Image (cartoon, grey):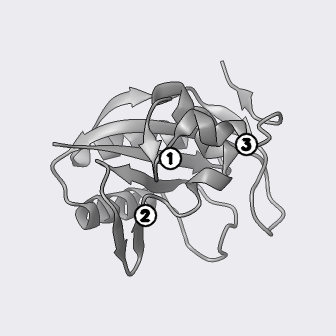
Amino acid sequence: MARVALSLGSNMGDKRGNIAKALSALDEGGARIVARSADYRTAPWGPVAQDWFVNACVVAETDLPPTDLLALCRRVEQQLGRIREVRWGPRIIDIDILTYDGATVDDSGLTIPHPHLQERAFVLVPLAEIAPDLTVRGRRITDMLQELDASDILKLS
């Protein structure tokens, strides 16, 4: 079993409900959720004006190889109604593979560890909650987070 870290985000419709549905579908599809962060309200990221996000991270165990895990993530996004029109635009659900059992993957369409992980407080805050000592590219998640401004990220109850 491979241990993986995933990031989920939604800024359309029932944001928290979208994340919950995605997690259920991932679990049923072969990515068994073993740890889940709280939901966090975060500012939109990217060049497109849009509503605020709810973000969360999970640690899961899977027998799926990385490309099959990516296919599962894309299938779940599509099942929930995601349409990829504008890069970094509004989305019902976004699921990113952050890490895959310490492996490095650099294929077309899939880069693991996630190439922008260390730049995104909206990912590092929930990930640090459930995997503070996870090491990516030789650095702990909590150390990466200390270098970013996370003051606008709000933990939801």
Q: Position of residue 114 (x, y in %)?
A: 48, 59
Q: CA distance from mark 1 to mark 2?
A: 16 Å
Q: Which residue is mark 1?
A: 7
Question: 5 or 89, which is in the foreground?
Answer: 5
Identity of the residue furthest to the front in this view: 138
Mark 2 packing: few (<14 Cα in 10 Å), some, or many (20+)? some
Secondary element at tag 1: strand
> What residue appears at the point 79 percent right and 52 percent down from the top-left corner?
51
Mark 2 or mark 1, which is nearer the start of the sequence?
1
> What residue appears at the point 21 percent right and 46 percent down from the top-left corner?
30
Indicate the amino acid at tag 3. Answer: Glu
> What residue appears at the point 37 percent right and 58 percent down from the top-left corner?
73
Location of residue 61 (image quadrant): top left
Q: Position of residue 19 (x, y in %)?
A: 51, 41
Circle 1 or circle 2, nearest the eye: 1
Q: Which residue is mark 3?
A: 147
Mark 3 or mark 2, which is nearer the start of the sequence?
2
Q: Which residue is mark 2?
A: 78
Indicate the amino acid at tag 2. Answer: Gln
Residue 32 marker: none
Question: 22 or 58, which is in the foreground?
Answer: 58
